[in-house]
Amino acid sequence: MKKRLALCALLCLAFVSVEGQTPIDVCGLLKSAKLHEGKTVTATGFVFADRHSTGIGGEGCSGGIVIRYDSGRVPRDFVDGVEAKRGRFDSRPFNVTVEGKFSSHVRGPLGYLRRIEVTKVLHWEFVDAAPASHNP
């Protein structure tokens, strides 16, 4: 009975640690990529998108992480925001938080890249630019 109870508690903790993860910013994820290899992560950053790739980057670090998602399984407003960045229709930063499986060494057309296979989009918003200060 004690073994079953301990096993149940361990499984519950494992489930909570994945579902209730604290988001890690992209810069932190890039620095500790090997630690998160093959695991489900919750990552936050700013979307970059062009004809060839879609990803998230962070403030203060170079590089980013490619994101892949099924546009039929994520919120339409998220897809619209990514497309607005891809088409350069909106120049404001697009801040997102996504959950998915992280891979630190995926073969791409021009070499290796880091990628998140998105299973959930937890947050998305365009961030208005800070108002410019004026000194007369």
Image (cartoon, grey):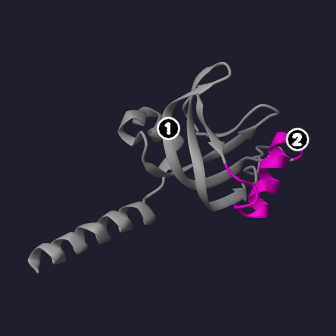
> What are the residue bounds of the magenta stretch?
69-89
The secondary structure type at the circle numbered 2 is: loop
Q: Position of residue 130 (x, y in %)?
A: 72, 50
Q: Position of residue 124 (x, y in %)?
A: 68, 59
**Residue in the image at 82% along x and 33% along y:** 51
Residue to which mark 1 is pinned: 103
Quadrant position of residue 97: bottom right
**Residue reaching furthest top?**
110
Q: Nearer the viewer, mark 1 or mark 2?
A: 1
Q: Is residue 18 one of those drawn in magenta? A: no
Which comes before the other along the chain, label 1 or label 2? 2
**Residue 86 as seen in the image, left or right of residue 25:** right
Q: Position of residue 12 (x, y in %)?
A: 31, 71
**Residue in the image at 48% along x and 55% along y:** 23
**Residue reaching furthest left?**
2
Q: Position of residue 91 (x, y in %)?
A: 82, 43
Residue to which mark 2 is pinned: 87
- Is 96 located above or below residue 49 in the figure? below
Few, some or many C-alpha atoms within 10 Å of disc 1 (few <14, some 14-19, many ≥20)?
A: many
Few, some or many C-alpha atoms within 10 Å of disc 2 (few <14, some 14-19, many ≥20)?
A: few
Which amino acid lies under the numbered mark 2 shown in the image of this protein? Gly
**Residue 82 as seen in the image, left or right of residue 25:** right
Quadrant position of residue 28: top left
Front in this rendered view, residue 99 or 59: 99
**Residue 122 as seen in the image, left or right of residue 24:** right
Quadrant position of residue 116: top right
Please state, as top left, top right, bottom left or bottom right, where the N terminus lies in the image.
Answer: bottom left
